[in-house]
Amino acid sequence: MSETFAVVPAPTGRTGRTVHRFRALRDSGETSRSRLFESSVGLVEDLRCPGERLNTTPEQFSADFQVCLPYRGLFVWHVGNDHVVGDANQVLFVSGGESYRVSQPRSAEYAELIVTPDPELLAELGRASRAALPFHPLFRRRSRRAGLGLMRRRTRVLHSAMGRVWSGLAAEECVIDLLRAALDSDSVTPLPSRGTRRLMGRAKEFLEAHLSSPIRLADVARAVDASPAYLTDTFRRVEGVPLHRYLTQLRLARALVELPSADDLTTLALDLGFSSHSHFAAVFRQAFGCTPSRFRESARAMVAASRPRA
C-alpha cells in the first residue's frame, strides 16, 4: 500500500525543543511518535509503526544527534551508503544533519525508543568534544549490539513511562544510565565490508521473521545463500556472539516487553519460540537473575507506582 508521511509539530516542551511526530497517512493505522520524558538531560520518545509492510519512506532528516533503541520488530535504516538493520538486539546512532530513509521488510509492527540527549551530556558520556561527535566510533559505525544489561535498562525506561508519571531526578538518572550503557564503545568491533553487512542483514531478517518457530542453521544459511560454516563464523565475528545466542536474545527482548501484560506464561513462552514454560523460565533466569513471573510482578509494580494517584 502506498502512503505519504507528514511531519507534525507537537507542543514545545520545557527545554524549548519541538517534538515532531511522524504520521503515516493511510486508510487505516498510523505511525505514532510520542514524548515520554523531557528535561535538561534530553528528550525520550516512543516511535511505533503498525504492522503493515512499508515501501521506503520519503527522505527524512534529524537535526540532532540521537541514540535509538529498537525493542520490537525490525526495520532498515538507509543513511548515506549504508543499510542498517534495526532489531531489538541493536542500538542505532544517528548523526545530526544527515538525511535518511526507512523501510520495513516485513508486515509486522516495529517500535523503538528515541533518545535525543543534550549535546554537552552526549559529548561527556561519549568521551569526545561536541565537534568530534560525528567522528565518534559508534556514530561512524551507526550501530552496535545491545547486551542483556542494556536491554534491561531499555525496558526499565519503557515500563516506568507506562505509568505516565515519570519525571524528576530518578527519571533523569535512568536516562543517563541508559545512555552511558549505550555509548560504551570498549567492545565495538571494526566495521565489516558492505557485502558482509548485507549478509548479516538478511540473516537478521530471517531470524525476526521466524522468531516463534524452531530454526535450523541450514534454513538460515539457505535463506541468505551462504554455507553454514561461513555464516556461523562471520556472524560470530561481526556480532560477537553465535547465531543461536543472538536469536535467544531477540526472544528475551520480546519477553521483557510482553511480560507485564502476559497472563499465561506458557502461551507467551511458546509464542516466543521456546519449547516449554520451563525452558523459557530457565533461559530467562540465567540471563536476568530472576524468573519471568518475578520479573512480571516487579514490572507491574513499577508501572503502578508511576501512575498518578487519585
Image: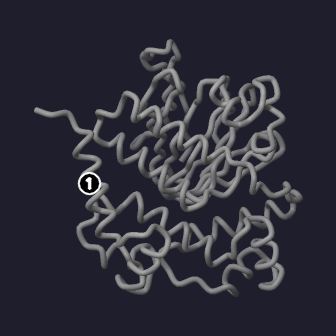
- Say whether residue 168 is visible: yes
Q: On the rendered image, what quadrant is the C terminus found in? A: top left
Q: Where is residue 76 in the image (x, y as percent from the top left)?
A: 66, 51
Q: Which residue is drawn at 62% across and 56% down?
A: 146
- In the image as oriented, which residue stretches furthest toward the top? 16
Q: In this view, does 201 lie above or below 229?
A: above
Question: 166 above or below 239?
Answer: above
Amino acid type of the residue tagged 1 in the rendering: Arg
Seen from the viewer's position, the closer of residues 220 and 310 is 310
Q: Name the residue under label 1.
A: 300
Q: What residue sits 28% from the left and 65% below the top?
A: 262
Say above or below: 6 vs 75: above
Query: In terms of image quadrants, where is residue 271?
Result: bottom left
Q: Would residue 109 be found to the left or right of residue 232 on screen?
A: left
Could you tell me residue 193's position as x and y percent?
Answer: 89, 59
Q: Residue at coordinates 53% horizontally, 84% vertically from top-left?
A: 214
Dot 1 lies on which element?
A: helix
Give the total of numbered labels.
1
Render colour scheme: one colour
In the picture provided, is 157 more to the left or to the right than 166? right
Residue at position x 48%, y 40% in the image: 47
Q: Which of 52 and 200 is in front in this view?
A: 200
Question: Does the image show residue 25?
Answer: no
Residue 234: image location, x then y, percent = 81, 73
Q: How many residues crowd around disc 1 within 10 Å: few (fewer than 14), some, or many (20 or more)? A: some
Q: Percent position (x, y) of residue 272? A: 43, 73
